[in-house]
Amino acid sequence: MEMDLNAQVKKAGFLQRLKEFPSKLKDGVTKRIKNVQKFGKDDPRRIIHSLKVGLSLTLVSMLYYVRPLYNSFGVSGMWAILTVVVVSEFTVGGTLSKGLNRGFATLIAGALGVGAVHLARFCGDKGEPIVLGIFVFSLGAAATFSRFFPRIKQRYDYGALIFILTFSMVAVSGYRTDEILVMAYQRLSTILIGGTICILVSIFVFPVWAGEDLHKMIANNIIKLANSLEGFEGEYFPSSEKTSKETNSCVQQYKSILTSKSTEDTLANLARWEPGHGRFRLRHPWTKYLKIAGLVRQCAFHLEILNGYVLSDVKIPQDFISKIQEPCSIMSREACEALKAIAKSIKTMKRDSVCVNAYIENSKNAIQNLRIALKTSSPETEKDLLEIIPGVTMASILIEIVNYVEKISEAVEEFTGLAHFKETPDPKVSPELGQHQLLHRGSVKPVLEGDSEEENNSSPHVVINVHDEQPPTTSEKKVSGVQKTRVGVV
């Protein structure tokens, strides 16, 4: 009785699963289609790259489909298809790197392989395999050892690998065939045809430039630093203007910079293979991006430490916070504006050192004010000292961040000269500096019309002294002008 009941339950469960199968299958297919659509929308270039690989494979397949071509190359046409599969990369630099490495390595290895076979045949039937074995051992070991050198590993590792493979195949197979030259010619020709098709399609059909991606990545990372620094001010010195959730999301933007080194190194390596394109000249200083990226990453590490103080539960005396709040806020705000100006300069490829230097100068002035505030906040007891140590540490880290912003500015200034960025006109007062950069200090004194300022102070006329401090230009020091204007008061 129990067995019949169990069998009925299993049968009912099976029928239920069978009924639910079509709806689950539909939901699963719909979910995967949505994931594919989202993945494609995140970067439409992925779809374009897939279509480009399909186009390259179709073109190179003509070596098999067209009878005259097949009669010329035979089954060696398969090497062209294999070349397209392994050479096609997402970026132009990646395709050029693999294509040129494969082409030159095949050419050199094929020539050496043919030469080794002909030389070995002079040694007779018994000596030929011994000589070939010595050549394969020597060149294979030497090429493998060369792959440990950092420069070769970085740029020519794939070429060294193809050299070992091609030389070994030509040298070994040449022992059993008399048509070694025909075989080497056909393989080299088909590999060059496949590589050429890949390179042409990669360059002329919706190209994806590694250099452009690196350029945008560095600028975006600097903007992330600026946003994190701006969020720090709102998080550590909260105000009613920004909520904690908004500022916390801004503070966390720097985290992606900490793990970006491998991507930056790869893009810089691939960019050096690319020809001049768009705004980038043939000998664009791609390696300088890595110097800037290193400084940006060091600044991000300091932000990581600073964020630890923001998230900590350590309570700092409110009176001490109130003393350092204004200089710290100015430091973070001015450094943030400097980073944004640097990022804009990189994006637009225009030099704007006047604006950046003004922000950095203001942040340095805030550092001096902070030091004065710290000197006036000397603790009276050891307990008071222990309470303010976290705040002092936070302030010192913020000073280090400002120093790194200055280093980033200097590195970008050096880079802009090498990259031939366009010069931005230097107006006396740049509109991008903002109102907080134009400092006005004035005094109002009554004066009689036609008399000096020091006589009667009961006159209905006044003289206004306005002192304007201009930011320093690249060729001039900071100057201040004094203007006097007579204003009649009715």
Image (cartoon, helix red, strand yellow):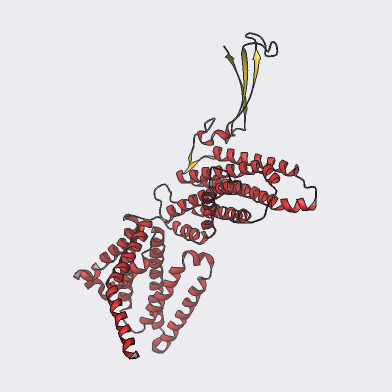
Residue 116, image x, y percentages: 41, 78
Residue 37, image x, y percentages: 33, 60
**Considering only vertical position in the picture, is 304 above or below 330?**
below
**Considering only vertical position in the picture, is 365 above or below 125?**
above
Instruction: Describe residue 416's horizontal placement relative to residue 45 as left or right.
Output: right
Q: Quadrant of the C terminus?
A: top right
Residue 176, image x, y percentages: 34, 84
Q: In this view of the protein, which residue sits in the foreground, 261 or 210?
A: 261
Instruction: Describe residue 33's horizontal placement relative to residue 318 as left or right.
Output: left
When asked about the image quadrant of residue 203, the answer is bottom left
Instruction: Describe residue 383's horizontal placement relative to residue 417 as left or right.
Output: right
* Direction front: furthest residue: 1
When asked about the image quadrant of residue 324, the answer is top right
Q: Quadrant of the N terminus?
A: bottom left
Q: How many marks?
A: 0
Q: In this view of the protein, which residue sits in the foreground, 305 or 220?
A: 305
Q: In this view of the protein, which residue sits in the foreground, 75 or 334?
A: 334
Residue 304, image x, y percentages: 59, 56
Q: In this view of the protein, which residue sits in the foreground, 30 or 53?
A: 30
Residue under the point 41% across and 89% down: 126
Instruction: Describe residue 25's horizontal placement relative to residue 139 as left or right.
Output: left
* Direction left: furthest residue: 67
Q: Is residue 283 visible?
A: no
* Direction top: furthest residue: 450
